[in-house]
Amino acid sequence: MIRYLIKNNVKLMARSKTNILIIVIAPLILIALLSSAFKDMMERYEGSDIVAGYRVEGDVPDELIEAFVDGASENGFTLREFATGDPEDILKDNDIGGFVIFEKDSYKLYQSSDYKEEGKILEYFVNAFYENTAETALSMASGGMAGGAEADSIDLRVEHPDYMKSIDSTDYYGIIEIVYFGWCAIVCGAGIFMSEKKYRIRKKYQVSNLNEFQLYLAKFIPIVVAVFLGIGLAGVLSVVLFGVHYGNILYTLLIILFSVAAASAFGLMVYNIFDNIVVTIIAVFAAVWFAGFFGGSFETYMYSVHPMEVKLASPIYHINRSLVELSCMGHSDYISSACFYSIAIIVVCSIVAVIAGTLRKRGKA
């Protein structure tokens, strides 16, 4: 019986070809737009060192400045110290991308209008220096940072320069947008839900011997298969059209499959709770947008200045980072966390979806 339902749901989804085409075409459009928009910034970072100036004013710990200078040097920045002079004049007269003034409990950052990409990268670096650190190697008095940070102590651990030399904007967004639209999997299931409402199929289920878990699987499996094939086709087209390079194919397919399954389980959970496809799509899209925002779907996670704790809370970050590192380095420490995070979502969301469906069925009995 369940095989019949799976087959029937596949047919229902096939009738809504537009929903499936969205999963295929929309990622390709975003790949083209975002890879082009970020191309210059990422190429400039790869091509040469970024020159920036700095000055120390007030009682700033020497360890702080030494750590910043050493870290900047290791990550492709050429720093020049200017003891005096107006920052804006220094930017104009010395052809540098940015200028940082370190004060006792704060910093001020100036960016050049002629070297916007370099200035932006310097901004990310300085913010990451203060905010994206886990442990303390340097002590600093607690206080508000001019750049928005507030810290008792800091330790230089900037993640984005490590990978920028190995991946360009096309490869990055060619991978990232496939993941992002895979998380919009519930769209492909709209045909099933609408048909259930239109033809009152649920009432027929109530007199069958199928339990709620079987009914759940009858929707879950077709959605996972359809979305996986859809974004798989989008991935192949991205390789053909844009020359996107993927890493280890086996690991890549496994991570994407778990990702799609997690997205499908999450979408079905939301639908079983609200029992309304419009509300479900809005809620899922909102959640996916926020997870993608902090996970690097729009702004590259290498440049992102969000706290590391916020990034790690996003399942999309683990998936994105594992796939990007597989592409540019051939290995990643995030493969396990990406898979485990997805599996946890599948299990938890499936349980909640089945419970919600059971309670609704009892309420209507």
Image: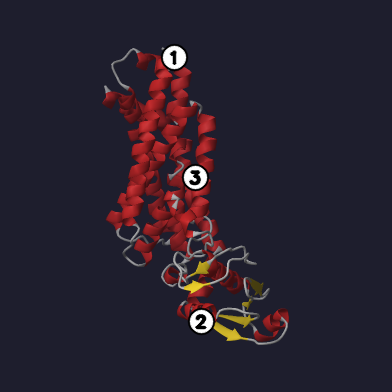
Q: Which residue is mark 2?
A: 66
Q: In what element is the residue under mark 1? A: helix
Residue 161: give x, y in percent of width and height: 46, 71
Q: Residue at x 48, y 42 (%)?
A: 22
Q: CA distance from mark 3 to mark 1?
A: 31 Å
Give 35 or 162, whichever is nearer the viewer: 162
Residue 364 - label? 1
Spatial CA span between label 1 and label 2: 68 Å
How many neighbours does mark 1 have within 10 angstroms: few (below 14), some (14-19), or many (20 or more)? few
The three-letter code of the residue at mark 2 reads Glu
Residue in the picture at 38% in, 53% down: 236
Q: Nearer the viewer, residue 163 or 204?
A: 163
Quarter of the picture containing the C terminus is: top left
Q: Earlier in the sequence, mark 2 or mark 3?
A: 2
Q: Amino acid at mark 3?
A: Val
Q: Nearer the viewer, mark 1 or mark 2?
A: 2
Q: Which mark is residue 288?
A: 3
Residue furthest front as drawn: 141
- The residue mark sitting in front, 3 or 1, is 1
Q: Nearer the viewer, residue 362 or 141?
A: 141
